[in-house]
Structure formats: structure tokens, C-alpha cells
Image (cartoon, grey):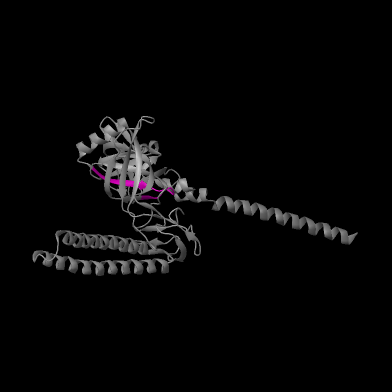
């Protein structure tokens, strides 16, 4: 019985100790919480606002169209002579240059033919030399009355026939050399070559079809279509602003690149089915970003490229004196600034005067502040990221 009483007292003491610890924990938590710390610092009445940075950006008027990337030059390589394919001289998918040897068709037969045609030409020349001498001899005899006119005419005719044989032999010789040259199939353009569609050992002829395809990738052409009304607007802007200055291209991954337009032409008629007309723009592509066959968005700018300060429309306020924005300086003090407005571009307001790039402009919490108010700030980009 005595042991039991001592155990109960110990248990009661331990329960009491736990209760005291819990109470102390809650007390300390309340004292050290951020809200109480903030109140203790004396900033419980400081308003909180969201700000964004006034940005300098390109605000050139633009129009967006869907463009199709086309190769200006595309070649299907086909054989011009027949024979077994002996060599494939390129790496599939590589860049080839104009004049590079791509395929070699068996050459021994064509070399032999060239030699044969050369021998025939030499024979024809030798025959002509003999008949020319005979003609001159007959002519001399005729002048001395030792040869008749018919003999002279026959000698002259034989000489002319020999000259014709030379011309024919020369033509056959040139054709044989051309065929020999065609046994080495060369690239007619600079570009990327695809898969070899015929491999070594196969017999090819002029009816074998395409052996490989080459696509020129620099420069390339982007074609897009506009309505007849848009075409008139573009022409009017072109004349009014002194011509188109540049184009921006939005790639499928969203990246924007800017390239100068090398040349541009418009199709010669409107497509009656779609009531649109095609415009072809030529761009340099030495970085290979534009891939023939792909689709991009093309932004056409008119007039001179210009930059301007822009802010969200939510930052604007008005009173009887005009439009103003509320900015926050480096000391977190609110300053009112009168601004002059320009156009609206992509839901952002152009500020033509009164604001400089980099200033922090309040876009939420304007109703809480006045000029000279000290504030706490949060950046709109950080808030959106969270």
C-alpha cells in the first residue's frame, strides 16, 4: 500500500510538469511569432503594395502572320548515264558544296568509249589530210589541163566528206567525254543532303529515279499569305513610313529571332479560293535556325524601329490634372509622377514622358497610399512565380 501511494504522487508531479511545459511553449510561440515581432517593430500600419519595373521595350507596330519555311533551291539527284554504282562519296545528312562528288558510276567502259571516239577523230583527221592533198593535186593538174573538171569535182567532194567525218567524230568524242563526266555525279548547289536512296553495287540508269535529295538552307524563304485588304494596308504603310525595316520570327519553341530581309516579292495574283495573296520573304540562315518545311510566326514591322517605356495599365490613375502613376523609391517612399501616354501595345501602356526605365511602379494597393507614404513592397513577378 505504501509503494502504491508513492507512485501516484510521482505520476501527478510528472503530469503537472508536462502541463507547465506545454503552457510555456504556447506562451513563447505567441511572443516570438512574425506577426507579434512585426507589431513590436512598430510597422503594423505600413501598407503593403505590389510593384513592377517600368521596362524599355521595342514598340514598333507589327503584324503577325503564320509563315511556311521553304528552300529556295531543292535538287533531286538523278543519274544521266547507266552502269553499276561504284562509290558513294558523301556522309548522309551532311552539308555538301557545289561541285562535290556525290556518286561514282563505273567509269572503265566510258573511259574506253572516250578513247575509241578519240581514235575515230584522229582517223577522220588523217583521212581529211590525205583527201585535202589530193584535191590540191587535182586542182594543180586541172589548171595545167592535165585533169578534167569532173576529177577536180570528185576530189573536192571527197575532201568535204572527210571534213564532215571530222565534225561527226568530234561530236561523238565530245558526247563520250560528257558521258564520262556524268559517271561522277556532283552537287549542283550548296545544301544539306539526305539519305542515299541507291547504294553501292546497284545498277542505275536514266530511269532509276532519285538517288539523293539536296536542300539549300542558306538563304531560305518564308512564305505567308495576307488578305487583299491587308495587302493594301501593307502597301499604304510601306509608302507612308518609307518601307518595311525588319521582320521578327517567332520559332516553334517560342524563341524570337530577328533577321534582315534580303529580298521580298508578292505573288502575281490573288488566290480566288481563299481571297489571299502570298508574300515571299528571303532570309539569311547561316545559323541553320530556319528549317525548310517548318512553320513559324513572322512579325512584320513597318517604319523605323523604336523603343519606349511601358507599364501595365493597372498602374495608371487619373485626377483633374491628368494621368499619373505612383512609384516607390529606394527608401520605400511613394512618389506621385505625372506621365504622358502613348499607344497601347500588347496590353501595356506606352509612357512617352514622366517615367524612366527601372522605376518601381505600384500596380496593386494604390488605394492604400498617397504621395510620401512609406510602404512595404512585393514584386509582381515574384508573386506570380509563387
**For the point 28% across and 40% down, which residue is it?**
351
In the rendering, at what x and y percent does residue 261 appear?
28, 48
Please say whether residue 249 is one of the residues in the magenta stretch: yes
**For the point 84% across and 60% down, which residue is it?**
6
Taking the image as shown, residue 30 lies to the left or right of residue 172, namely right
Taking the image as shown, residue 66 lies to the left or right of residue 201, namely left
Question: Relative to residue 139, is residue 310 depicted above or below?
Answer: above
Q: Nearer the viewer, residue 70 or 324?
A: 70
Residue 248 visible to the viewer: yes
In the rendering, at what x and y percent does residue 212 appear?
44, 56
Question: Relative to residue 128, is residue 354 depicted above or below?
Answer: above
Query: Dividing the image into 4 quarters, which one contains the N terminus?
Result: bottom right
Count of number-bearing discs: 0
Residue 337 visible to the viewer: no
Q: Nearer the viewer, residue 382 or 213?
A: 213
Judged from this view, the residue extending furthest toward the left is 144
Secondary structure mostly seen in the magenta stretch = strand
User: Which quadrant of the structure image shows residue 160?
Assistant: bottom left
**For the point 83% across and 57% down, which residue is it?**
8
In the rendering, at what x and y percent does residue 187 appear?
36, 60
Please say whether residue 255 is one of the residues in the magenta stretch: yes
**For the point 28% across and 63% down, which residue is it?**
170
Q: Nearer the viewer, residue 210 or 228?
A: 210
Taking the image as shown, residue 348 lies to the left or right of residue 235, namely right
What residue span does the magenta drawing correspond to?
Answer: 244-256
User: Which quadrant of the structure image shows residue 152?
Assistant: bottom left
User: Which quadrant of the structure image shows residue 242?
Assistant: top left
In the rendering, at what x and y percent does residue 343 appear?
28, 36
Amino acid at each position: 500500500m505504501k509503494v502504491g501511494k508513492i507512485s501516484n504522487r510521482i505520476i501527478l508531479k510528472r503530469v503537472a510538469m508536462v502541463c507547465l511545459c506545454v503552457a510555456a511553449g504556447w506562451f513563447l510561440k505567441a511572443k516570438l511569432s512574425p506577426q507579434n515581432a512585426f507589431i513590436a517593430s512598430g510597422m503594423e500600419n505600413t501598407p503593403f503594395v505590389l510593384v513592377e519595373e517600368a521596362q524599355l521595350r521595342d514598340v514598333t507596330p507589327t503584324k503577325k502572320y503564320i509563315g511556311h519555311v521553304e528552300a529556295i533551291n531543292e535538287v533531286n539527284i538523278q543519274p544521266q548515264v547507266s552502269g553499276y554504282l561504284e562509290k558513294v562519296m558523301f556522309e548522309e545528312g551532311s552539308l555538301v558544296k557545289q561541285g562535290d562528288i556525290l556518286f561514282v558510276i563505273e567509269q572503265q567502259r566510258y573511259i574506253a568509249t572516250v578513247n575509241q571516239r578519240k581514235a575515230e577523230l584522229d582517223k577522220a583527221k588523217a583521212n581529211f589530210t590525205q583527201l585535202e592533198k589530193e584535191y590540191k593535186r587535182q586542182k594543180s593538174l586541172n589548171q595545167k589541163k592535165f585533169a578534167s573538171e569532173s576529177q577536180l569535182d570528185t576530189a573536192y567532194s571527197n575532201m568535204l566528206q572527210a571534213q564532215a567525218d571530222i565534225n561527226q567524230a568530234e561530236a561523238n568524242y565530245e558526247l563520250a567525254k560528257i558521258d564520262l563526266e556524268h559517271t561522277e555525279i556532283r552537287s549542283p548547289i550548296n545544301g544539306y543532303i539526305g539519305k542515299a536512296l541507291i547504294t553501292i553495287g546497284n545498277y542505275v540508269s536514266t530511269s532509276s529515279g532519285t538517288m539523293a535529295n539536296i536542300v539549300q538552307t542558306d538563304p531560305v524563304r518564308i512564305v505567308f499569305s495576307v488578305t487583299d485588304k491587308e495587302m493594301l494596308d501593307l502597301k499604304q504603310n510601306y509608302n507612308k513610313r518609307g518601307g518595311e525595316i525588319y521582320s521578327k520570327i517567332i520559332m516553334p519553341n517560342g524563341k524570337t529571332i530577328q533577321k534582315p530581309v534580303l529580298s521580298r516579292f508578292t505573288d502575281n495574283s490573288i488566290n480566288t479560293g481563299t481571297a489571299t495573296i502570298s508574300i515571299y520573304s528571303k532570309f539569311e540562315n547561316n545559323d541553320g535556325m530556319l528549317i525548310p518545311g517548318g512553320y513559324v510566326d513572322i512579325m512584320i514591322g513597318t517604319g523605323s524601329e523604336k523603343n519606349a517605356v511601358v507599364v501595365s495599365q493597372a498602374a495608371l490613375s487619373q485626377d483633374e490634372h491628368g494621368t499619373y502613376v505612383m512609384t516607390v523609391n529606394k527608401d520605400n517612399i511613394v512618389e506621385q509622377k505625372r506621365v504622358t501616354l502613348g499607344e497601347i501595345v500588347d496590353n501595356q501602356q506606352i509612357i512617352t514622358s514622366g517615367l524612366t526605365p527601372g522605376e518601381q511602379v505600384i500596380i496593386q494597393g494604390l488605394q492604400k497610399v498617397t504621395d510620401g507614404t512609406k510602404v512595404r513592397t512585393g514584386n509582381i513577378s515574384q508573386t506570380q512565380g509563387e
